[in-house]
Image: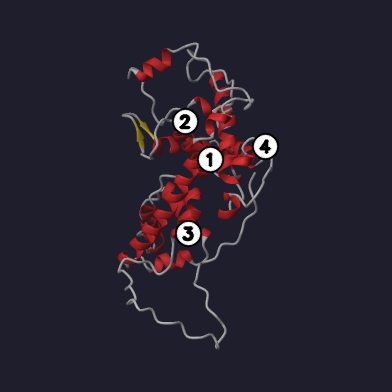
Amino acid sequence: MIASLSDIHHPRPESSDNDNDPEPTPSKKPKKAQAKDDAPDDYVGYGRIIGRHLGPFVNVAAVIEYGCKADSAMSGDEEETDERLAEAWTILWKKFPGFHEYLLSISNKPVERRAIEKQLTIGMEAVRSEDTSTLKTRIPAWLHVDPTTPLNPALPNLTTYLEIAQGEKHVTGAQLPAFVFPLGQEFPIGEDLDHPAWKAVLDNALKGEVLLRSGKAMYMGPNSALEGEGFHKGRPGNASVIGLITFSRRTIAGVATQVYFGLSSKQEWYKTDGDHFNYEEFFWTIYDLFDNEEWGEEIICLWNQ
């Protein structure tokens, strides 16, 4: 379900090679001076590309700050490695030829750097909103194994629902919701977490139909959600646009976070939902599942189909 990688180049304005082109007519309005905090290029497009690679809650300013310090430090002056920031920094600069050298060259130019960080953030937030729009109204149609059946689920046991609604039971970002697992998954409620039955359940994490359908919708287009492996119709999907050739722990965690928000009653993005649930914590909970490398490779292969 992933498209081929497209080359992405550092954008530069086009120029004409025709020396006989007429001189442009001067505008009657005075030319607007470039603001001091304007970046020399439009990096919103960069943010739109990198946003889905990094995840919905990455602070790009913190990533650039960390990366510039780490890559310009003298031997022996290196700070303690932050694996998440280091990974995000590598993803950021590797995606755009020449971007690494450029960011290092402006590491001591805070105004210019902040302008770039602002534009990157605008682009990243834009694609997050687009993905939310893609899923929010469509997810209810993907909740059954057979999507043609009416969405009228029975609730034979209201105990857990009522406990949550009344504040007696708290849902946190460290927990895995049912949609992470295949529809019909049985949970050994009452057994200790080290019981073998729970191991079998965790082996099925991130194999849920709702998750996989949402991933296809986000990266191949909504029409692909309920189709077979490799189906694509119409214009290039987001996977092709951003040069995604394989899912990663970050992109899968991003889909799971979007699905959680899509199933909620919230209409605007916040890091928290209520007093206890934190979307950023949930993102990293999914991310950390891939510390089991053998299982993680299996999941990524499944998502790439």
Name the residue tied to disc 3: 45
Residue 8 numbered tag: none
Quadrant for residue 299, please give it: top right
Dot 3 or dot 4: first in sequence order is: 3
Name the residue tied to disc 1: 252
| Picture quarter with the N terminus | top right
Q: Are marks 3 and 4 in contact (CB under 8 Å)?
A: no
Label 4 is placed on what type of residue?
Glu
- Does dot 4 land on a helix, a strand or a loop? loop
Q: Nearer the viewer, mark 3 or mark 1?
A: 3
Dot 3 or dot 1: first in sequence order is: 3
Q: Residues within 10 Å of mark 1 (few under 14, many from 20)?
A: many
Label 2 is placed on what type of residue?
Leu
Name the residue tied to disc 4: 227
Q: Is residue 93 above or below residue 148?
A: below
Indicate left or right for 188 with 106 as reference: right
Q: Are marks 4 and 2 in contact (CB under 8 Å)?
A: no
Task: Please give the name of the residue rendered at 64% of the width and 37% of the height, measured from the top-left corner.
Answer: 302
